[in-house]
Image (cartoon, rainbow, N blue to C red):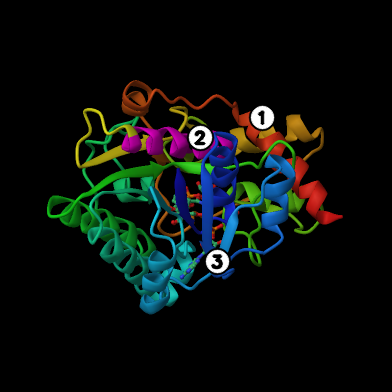
Amino acid sequence: MKILVTGGLGFIGSHTVVELQNEGFEVVIVDNLSNSSIEVLDGIERITNKKPLFENIDLRDKKSVQDFFVKHQDIDGVIHFAASKAVGESVENPLLYYENNINALVYILQELQAKAKANFIFSSSCTVYGQAETMPITENAPVQQAMSPYGNTKQIGEEIILDVAKVSNINAILLRYFNPIGSHPSAEIGELPLGVPQNLVPFITQTAVGLRKELSVFGNDYPTPDGTAIRDYIHVVDLAKAHVVALQRLLENKNLDKVETFNIGTGTGSSVLEVIYAFEKVSNQKLPYKIVGRREGDVTEAYANTDKANNVLGWKAKSSLEEALASAWKWEQKIKK
Ligand code: NAD
Ligand code: WQD
């Protein structure tokens, strides 16, 4: 079975390629290296003993997407990770986000629509729920007005897929990720943020390794037990494995709706302070931090009800927060060298 993984050199994509190859899938990666490095291919090879096929293509170029599918007519499934993902940058430059996250999706779906049968997995996000009214969040919680152009591209992306699936042979699974963290336990691949990290865990590990002076905790006046905001942090390897089972479900095509949506999280919420304390425990060192004001656009809490993924996909996150943080720490120490 041959699987196209767009954005397969990125953080989540690279970990998913490893799990796909471990399960015997043949992988073709398409990536334009806009937020990743070609060395990731070697990391994947060191873990799996197999180098995936790689095509350096910018998915915003429709002709290149068409040519890709002419060359690779035997694709059995597509996992579409490629996108721009920085929330703040999307506010500054919305058209960059609409072009990259929407045009590329449309061009791929146009090629899949022409096929007799196609399987498609889309990287969506818990950001579509905004501040949900009840915790944990089920897939039936309403999609809220997007808080950023980035978030809007995920909502529009989901809608485009729903519309196209109705009139084509495309079956799709939308995976709404909660907060992916960590790295492969081998520390051969991991997260490579460009510039100053916006996300909590890379900022913590960069602080601990000495690249940043201290972590700013954005707000301790939230209506939560310790006043800091709560999220559902999922180990990227668990998240990667969810893609493999979702793909297997599409390929088996049993009792499948045209488009299915799953929350992919651990089901447990952790506050910013809990993450800091867990990190201090696994790294055996104090983390310098200060409390500052809230960050604009942040929600108070978001954690997943994962019953649907557990029951329908037969998937469950296995790693603890400590294990995920330990892997992130191992990776940070390695890339510092
Ligand atoms: P990432 O930036 O590490 O990976 C994305 C990859 O796509 C990069 O390798 C980049 O070079 C590539 N890419 C971007 N635009 C491209 C284009 N036009 N043509 C070809 N390649 C292109 O991001 P990630 O964290 O691995 O996220 C993967 C997906 O998951 C994205 O769709 C993201 O929006 C979504 N997501 C991420 C998170 C998160 O917290 N990391 C949470 C929810 C959803
Ligand atoms: C987590 C918590 C911060 C940094 C973002 C996107 C979302 C999704 C994942 C893709 C929050 C706090 C953070 C720091 C802090 N991406 N924090 N100091 O905000 O849940 O989600 O990434 O779809 O769309 O919005 O994740 O890691 O940025 O923050 O106190 O330096 O850590 O306020 O409470 P978030 P995050």
Q: Amino acid at mark 2?
A: Lys
Q: Which residues are magenta?
A: 231-251
Q: Nearer the viewer, mark 1 or mark 2?
A: 2
From the image, tell me which residue sits under label 1: 323
Mark found first going from the N terminus, 1 or 2:
2
User: Do the residues under discs 1 and 2 have CB atoms within 8 angstroms?
Assistant: no
How busy is the neighbourhood of tag 3: few (under 14 within 10 Å), some, or many (20 plus)? few
The disc placed on residue 305 is none
Image spot of residue 306 (x, y percent): 37, 28
Image spot of residue 229 (x, y percent): 48, 41
Residue sitting at 38 percent across and 63 percent down? 150
Mark 2 → mark 3, Cα distance in angstroms: 23 Å
User: Do the residues under discs 1 and 3 have CB atoms within 8 angstroms?
Assistant: no
Judging from the image, what secondary structure is the residue with disc 1 in? helix
From the image, tell me which residue sits under label 3: 55
Asked whether residue 12 appears in the rendered view, the answer is yes
Residue sitting at 73 percent across and 53 percent down? 206
User: Do the residues under discs 2 and 3 have CB atoms within 8 angstroms?
Assistant: no
Judging from the image, what secondary structure is the residue with disc 3 in? strand
Left or right, residue 144 beside residue 300:
left
Residue sitting at 41 percent across and 75 percent down? 60
**Which of the 4 image quadrants contains residue 312?**
top left
Q: Residue furthest left?
A: 167
* Secondary structure that dominates the magenta span: helix
Q: Amino acid at mark 3?
A: Glu
Based on the picture, tell me whether residue 279 belongs to the magenta stretch.
no
Q: Is residue 157 above or below residue 201?
A: below
